Image (cartoon, rainbow, N blue to C red):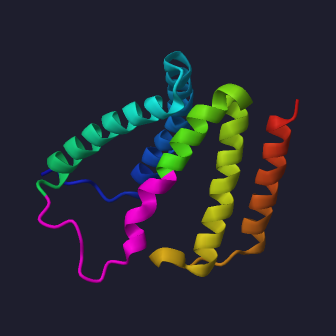
Amino acid sequence: MIELPQNSTLYALIMLCAGIGIPVMAALNAGLGTKLQSPALAASILFVVAMAASVLFLLLVEGIPTSFSAPSMPFYYYLGGLFIVFYVLGVTWIAPRFGIGNAISFVLLGQMLSMATIDQFGLMGAPQTSLTLPRLMGLIFMLIGVFLVVRK
């Protein structure tokens, strides 16, 4: 097993790369869905590739798991995959029609609104972080930014 470092700068860089990858993935999968004439097939291919990569990562970093559940695990913790399926199917179908920039701009706005709500109330076990005036202003600027980006 590989020991992963604990470092805020590294975390920020990894998440920055993940953020860069989201529109790239959207463009690739939208193109695949268009070429195959099936957003659902393109999404399915994406998930097969993603599953293979995540299982390889699991085995390299953590080894073979001993359990797939904890005794007191709320069932809804297992439903996160439904959101990624909705996202991938949605962006694969909508991006060729609406534009990558438009689609991702609204995804980012949705992420910011969801993040603020989850943090404000400490939902699903997340640490609670109050919606302060600076955070609220950031959300308002994000909304204005989305409007400016998608405006023709």
Where does residue 68 sit, x and y in percent of width and height?
21, 65
> Which residue: 70% across, 42% down?
105
Does residue 86 show up?
yes
152 left or right, relative to 129: right
Q: Relative to 80, does residue 151 appear above or below in the rendering?
A: above
> Which residue: 46% across, 29% down?
42
User: In the rendered structure, which segment of residues is drawn in magenta?
Assistant: 65-83
Determine if the magenta segment contains residue 4. Answer: no
> Which residue: 50% across, 32% down?
25
The residue nearer to you, when weighing 135 against 113, is 113
66 left or right, relative to 74: left
Which residue sits furthest bottom? Answer: 72
Q: Quadrant of the C terminus?
A: top right
1 left or right, relative to 14: left
Where does residue 5 sit, x and y in percent of width and height?
28, 55
The residue nearer to you, when weighing 118 against 130, is 118
Residue 128 falls in which quadrant of the image?
bottom right
Residue 104 falls in which quadrant of the image?
top right
The residue nearer to you, when weighing 9 against 54, is 54
